[in-house]
Image (tube, rainbow, N blue to C red):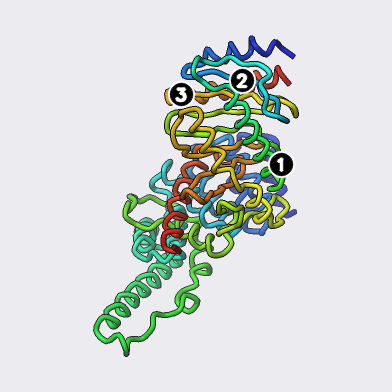
Amino acid sequence: MSDDIRGMTAELAADPDSLIFLELGEALRRRGQLDAAFKVARTGLGRYPELARAHDLFARIFCDRREPDRAFESWVTALQFDLTLVSAHKGLGFLYYQAGDLASAEKHLAYAGQADPDDGGTATALERVRADATAAKASVGAARVEPAQAEPPAATGDAVAPDDVMLPTIAGAGGLAFSFDEGARSPVQEAVFSGLDGGADGLLLVDANGLRLGGGLRNPDGQDVADSVAALLAGVSKEAARTTRLLALGDWRGLSVECGDGNLFLSAPSDSTLLLTVRGLDVPMGRVARFAERASAAARTWLERAE
Amino acid sequence: MSNPVQLLERLSTVRGLRGSVLVSAADGLIVAESLMTGVDGRAVAALAASLMNRLRRATECAGRREPVFLQLQAQGGSVLATPCGPDLVLVAVAGPDANVGLARLEMLEAAGKVA
């Protein structure tokens, strides 16, 4: 443990209400001690649930943990408490870029660039996003004119690797205005969609026979438990529907389960599927439910496309 | 263990609650009940206990601790449940206008007394 971290840890121990947790969490994150950083951030957030910078720290940790959906939620929450938090705009710009939503990425980065014009990293990232957007438009235009001769759009891997540009600059600060584009695609949905095809953790889409359709789930030790949990969830949807029908409560909408160490939410994207959303206790059940709602909508879209 | 019927009657004072039952977790049979007329106690008991057992297994498999509270939300209300130790489940039926937050707190407190 370095002296600065040791000092900050001692300071926090002496005064648990100290805002030094922000610096300590960030220092631990930069050292790659993500579990320790997460614990510090979670404890700090428990004391200051409306502190935008605490949510920003959480988001950066989630980003490093390759959990973009949770990072997105944390940055959105940060902006709910402080619309001028530049680092949250940078983070969202990065996530929108990863999700392929160049227009939203450009907007967030442009805000960040205006607020902090001396930040070369943001300027470079913005240039790249704009160049990509121009190339994408040109590619579409060429395809419309001469489909047979049009150049294929650049592969994702060749386009831009924003990590090196964006991540070191995420911790900036400054003032700017902000508004969401309601019509923009949500990176959360993108993450769910990619999770359905790949391996997003904490989201599990199951069919009526208990077979996994998409998503993934790991236990706290990191073991893959998706298939075994999927099997146990078979029939829950029917049972829930039967319960509410017999009690004349109408169609069921969701099933929230509080555990001692996490919050789970079950929803039904369709009559024959079930979506399980799992989050830690740091995410209140209300937010888990809202996230599950969006994930359910994304899953429904995916199911409709697949059918 | 406190008198279960008294605990259930206390629960019934929460706004919007249509009643509550104490259920055997193993077989879904009613141990004690305080329900409004028209609420099918046996259905509540059997189905809620079954749901709780299924979710217990699922959370255990997921490496999580046991469920401490569940809420089945529907268009016209909710079914709330919390385990009372390993053998019993406290279940309540709430209307759409119920104060679910207060019901949750009362149920968790009651469950602690029953267990």
| Residue type of the residue flagged with mark 1 | Ala
Residue at the disc numbered 1: A10
Mark 1 vs mark 2: give the one in front.
2
Question: Where, by quadrant of the figure, is residue B8 drawn?
Answer: top right
Q: Where residue B93 sits: x, y (%)?
A: 53, 24
Chain hosting mark 3: B
Q: Is residue A263 above or below residue A99?
A: above
> Which disc number belongs to residue B95?
3
- Residue found at x 54% / y 43%: A237
Distance from label 1 to label 2 (Cα)? 50 Å
Q: Relative to residue B76, is residue A48 drawn left or right?
A: right
Q: Quadrant of the C terminus of chain A?
A: bottom left
Q: Are marks 1 and 2 on the same chain?
A: no
Residue for badge 2? B21
Q: Label 1 marks which chain's residue? A: A
Amino acid type, callout 2: Val
Callout 3 amino acid: Gly
For the residues labelled 3 and 1, the Cα–Cα distance comes to 51 Å
Q: Residues within 10 Å of mark 1 (few under 14, many from 20)?
A: few
Q: Quadrant of residue A200?
A: bottom right
